[in-house]
Amino acid sequence: MPSALTDACGRFAPSPTGALHFGSLVAALGSCLEAGSRGGRWLLRMEDVDRPRCRPGAAARLLATLEACGFEWDGAVMLQSARTARYREVFEQLKGAGAVYPCGCTRGELAGVPNATPGIDGAPVYPGTCRGGLPPGKAARAWRLRLTGDIEFDDAVQGPQRQNLPHDVGDCVLLRADGLFAYQLAVVVDDADQGVDHVVRGADLIDSTPRQIYLQRLLGLPTPAYAHLPIAVDAAGNKLSKQTRAAPVDAAHPALALFAALRFLGLQPPAELRRGDAGGTPAERRRASADLWTWARANWQLNKVPRVLTLPAQNFYPGDIS
Ligand code: GLU
C-alpha cells in the first residue's frame, strides 16, 4: 500500500517507445525501493514529450507490466504530452531572461562542420554559430540554452562528477525545430513540479544531469539528489532498448524478473524466493513475487549497487539475450 511518511519523493519516468525491458525494470525497481526506504512517495511519469518516438499502446503496456510485477505508485501518472502549456510558460521565462537564443542551423549544416569537437556523448558540440545572433539570411528553427561554466555534483552511486558545459556538451536545444519541447526542459520542470527530491535512473543519463542542474539553478528550482544505476547492456555492450531488440520483461513470471533485477542491483535474495515461481500456478507465482517484494523492501541498500556504468544483462536475466 503506497504511503508517504516523509516529504521524500522519487519517480520512474519511462518513455513509451516500446515494451518494458530488463534495463527499465532495473530503473523502476531501484527508484521504487529507494523512495520506499526514505519513507517517501514514488511517482510514475510517462515521458512522451518526444511524440514521434512514442508507440501507440506502449504506455498502457508499460503500466500493465509494472502492475503485473507488483509495483504500486502514488497518485495519477503524469503525462508529459499534457504539459506543453507549462513548458511554454517556463520557456518564456528563460526567453525573457535572455537564457535561450534562436538557432537557424540545420542538422546537415552541423554534421558538416569541419573538425567539430566531439562532446562527452560523442556527438559534436554545437559550435556556437547562432549564439551571438542569427547570421543574415537564417531563420530561427530551434531555441538553444546558453550554457556556461562547470557543474559538479556527487552521485550517490557513481561518485563525484564534474562537467564543463561549453566544452563537454555545448548549448543544447530546449525548443526543437519540430515545435516540441526537449527532454532536458521537460524533465527539470516536471521533477520540480512533482516535488521529486531524489532521482534514481540509468547511468545513460548521467551526462545530462549537469545540464539539468544548470537549468534548475537558472530557474531557482531545488536540485534533487542523484543516483545513476548501471545500465543493462547486451553481449555487444549496447544498452538494452527497442533498437537492440531487447526482450520484454516476462510479466507472467514476475519473481524471476524481480530476482534478476535485485541481483543486478547488488543484492543477494535467497534462492528459495526464486524457486517459488518455477512451475507454479499463477496464484503461486504472484505469492512468490509478493514475498520477493517483502524481502527487497527489508534488504534494499543503495550502497550495494555496483559502482559501474554498465553491466551485462545476460549474466542476470538470461531471457534477455538479444
Ligand atoms: N525517459 C527517460 C528514459 O526512458 C528517463 C528520463 C529520466 O529518468 O530522467 O530513458
Image: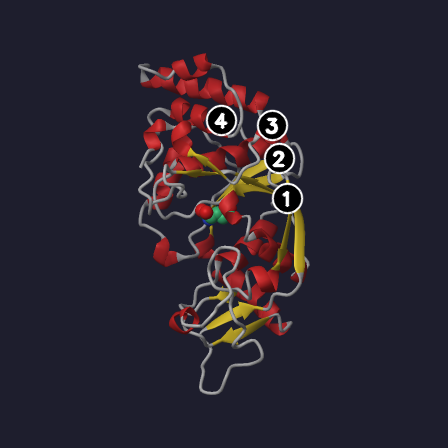
Residue linked to disc 4:
262
**Label 3 to label 1: alpha-carbon separation:** 18 Å
Q: Position of residue 199 (x, y in %)?
A: 58, 43
Q: Nearer the viewer, mark 2 or mark 3?
A: 3
Q: Secondary structure at mark 2?
A: loop
Q: Are marks 1 and 2 in contact (CB under 8 Å)?
A: yes
Residue linked to disc 1: 197
Q: Which mark lies nearer to you, 4 or 2?
A: 4
Task: Tell me which residue sits at (58%, 33%) in the image.
Answer: 34
Q: Nearer the viewer, mark 4 or mark 1?
A: 4
Q: Residue at (60%, 31%) from the top-left corner?
A: 302
Q: Earlier in the sequence, mark 3 or mark 1?
A: 1
Q: What's the CA distance linking mark 1 and mark 2?
A: 10 Å
Disc on the earlier residue, 4 or 1: 1
Amino acid type at circle 1 is Asp
Quick check: 170 left or right of 67? Answer: right
Q: CA distance from mark 2 to mark 3?
A: 15 Å
Q: Earlier in the sequence, mark 4 or mark 2?
A: 2
User: In the image, residue 305 lies at what x, y percent?
Assistant: 56, 31
- Distance between mark 3 and mark 4 Cα atoms: 11 Å
- Circle 4 packing at 10 Å, graded few (<14), some (14-19), many (20+), is many
Do we see residue 78 in this rendering? Answer: no
Observer-nearest of 160 and 34: 160
Q: Amino acid at mark 2?
A: Gly
Under 8 Å from ligand 1: the CB of mark 2? no
Residue at the spot of label 2? 40
